[in-house]
Image: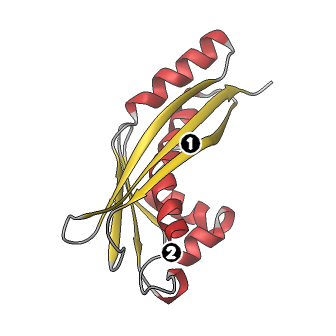
């Protein structure tokens, strides 16, 4: 099955309902990049009239994890995936529609190939940058993903 934004958003509704309810959506996906969006609204706000940091984190993680899922599916192997670490920095209040883009999908195929070849788990970092409608960076997230052949 090919991973498309529509199929993944349906998956979100059933498997990650908190992200779906907060308005996180996949907008575009390829082997090398993924775009997600989330719009500031009542359900995802913080007391400071901006988007709660964790909602931004869900959208950012989704922009990396969607590509990991797609590449695992493409490999045809049973591979587990997990976020081992993450880092975030915030540079501006997140209001309005925030778009997260990860363009580091090239790292996934190499890690999957290595874990299939060696049987050893692999780790790799992926960055997702969130920008507001004016193109101003509001937050940057880095996720350390691990992939390993399921035994």
Q: Is residue 109 left or right of residue 101?
A: right
Which residue sits at x=64%, y=64%? Answer: 16
Q: Nearer the viewer, mark 2 or mark 1?
A: 2
Q: Position of residue 112 (x, y in %)?
A: 55, 24
**Is residue 54 or residue 15 the one in the foreground?**
54
Which residue sits at x=33%, y=42%? Answer: 103
Residue 104, quarter of the rendered image = top left
Q: Under tag 1, what secondary structure?
A: helix
Q: Is residue 102 left or right of residue 11?
A: left
Q: Give me the C-alpha separation between circle 2 and circle 1.
A: 26 Å
Which residue sits at x=62%, y=17%? Answer: 116
Q: Under tag 2, what secondary structure?
A: loop
Q: Is residue 41 above or below residue 121?
A: below
* Structural crowding at the residue carrying mark 1, measured as other residues with C-alpha within 10 Å and reported as few (<14), some (14–19) or many (≥20): some
Q: Position of residue 57 (x, y in %)?
A: 51, 60
Which residue sits at x=37%, y=43%? Answer: 30
**Is residue 140 or residue 112 the one in the foreground?**
140
Residue 38, quarter of the rendered image = bottom left
Q: Is residue 16 left or right of residue 65?
A: right
Which of the two labelled residues, at mark 2 and mark 1, occupies the earlier sequence position?
Answer: 2
Picture quarter with the C terminus: top right
Which residue does the numbered mark 2 point to in the structure image? 52
Q: Position of residue 81 (x, y in %)?
A: 65, 38
Q: Is residue 42 above or below residue 105?
A: below
Q: Is residue 119 above or below residue 14?
A: above
Residue 93, quarter of the rendered image = bottom left
- Residue ranking furthest to the right: 151
Q: Position of residue 128 (x, y in %)?
A: 39, 50
Q: Is residue 73 above or below residue 45?
A: above
**Is residue 42 or residue 105 the one in the foreground?**
42
Picture quarter with the N terminus: top right
Which residue does the numbered mark 1 point to in the structure image? 69
């Amino acid at each position: 099955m090919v991973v498309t934004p529509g199929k993944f958003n349906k998956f979100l509704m059933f498997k990650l309902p908190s992200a779906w309810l907060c308005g996180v959506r996949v907008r575009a996906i390829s082997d090398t990049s993924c775009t997600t969006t989330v719009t500031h609204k009542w359900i995802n706000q913080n007391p400071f009239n901006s988007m709660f940091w964790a909602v931004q984190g869900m959208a950012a993680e989704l922009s990396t994890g969607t590509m990991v899922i797609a590449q695992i599916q493409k490999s045809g192997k049973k591979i587990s995936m997990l976020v081992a670490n993450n880092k975030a920095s915030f540079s501006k209040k997140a209001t309005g529609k925030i778009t997260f883009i990860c363009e580091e999908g090239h790292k996934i195929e190499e890690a999957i190939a290595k874990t299939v070849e060696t049987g050893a788990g692999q780790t790799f970092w992926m960055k997702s940058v969130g920008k507001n409608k004016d193109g101003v960076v509001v937050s940057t997230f880095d996720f350390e993903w691990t992939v390993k052949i399921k035994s």
